[in-house]
Amino acid sequence: MTVEEHGFAPGTDVLIRKVDSHLAAVRGSLRGAELELAERLAASLRELVVSTAQASAADRAQVRAAVHYFVLRRESRGNLLSVRSLAAAQRVVNKVARQLGRPDLLVEVRRDREPPVPAGDVALR
């Protein structure tokens, strides 16, 4: 019997598929900054999964926990949780990235867009 080699450790492609499946599911319900945050979290998680494929069991377990935290954000009724839950996932992913010495994979809030100005404040500027 021949085993096809993918270059990944067992379980790596499963974790990436989980991330991709979850992202596909939330694309229908998220818009704008929330969707962008979900996509950046997914990209960071994919890279963490790949970069720790040959790492210690403890490092892989941290990444696996972060993936599960991202994909299993559901209420008991099966509805997706709020954006606040995305912020919680962001904290978990960032904590794992820091612990693994990967500051390049931190998912930060983008501040490159100027917030909308309330109509009453226009004259003040």
Image (spheres, rainbow, N blue to C red):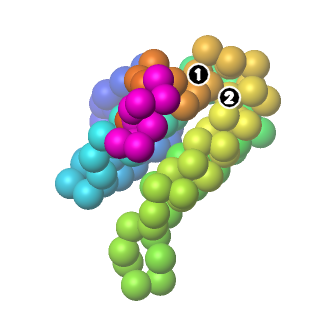
Give the magenta part as a residue range: 117-125
In the displayed structure image, the side of residue 72 where residue 98 appears, left or right:
right
- Which class describes the residues within 10 Å of circle 1: few (<14), some (14-19), or many (20+)? some
Q: Where in the figure is residue 42, as x and y percent of width and height? A: 43, 36
Mark 1, residue position: 105
Q: What is the three-letter code of the residue carrying label 2?
A: Ala
- The reply to whether the magenta stretch includes residue 3 is no
Q: CA distance from mark 2 to mark 1?
A: 6 Å
54 sits to left or right of 109: right
Q: Quadrant of residue 1?
A: top left
Q: Main secondary structure of the magenta part?
A: helix
> Is residue 123 part of the magenta span, yes or no?
yes
Residue 75 image position (x, y, % from top left) = 47, 76
Residue position marked by numbered label 2 in the rendering: 97
Q: Earlier in the sequence, mark 2 or mark 1?
A: 2
* Circles 2, 1 touching at the beta carbon (< 8 Å): yes
- At a point 49% along the width and 29% down the height, the residue shown is 124
Q: Secondary structure at mark 1?
A: helix
Looking at numbered disc 1 in the image, what kind of residue is underneath it? Answer: Leu
Query: How far across and how far down the image is residue 67, in percent?
Result: 54, 47
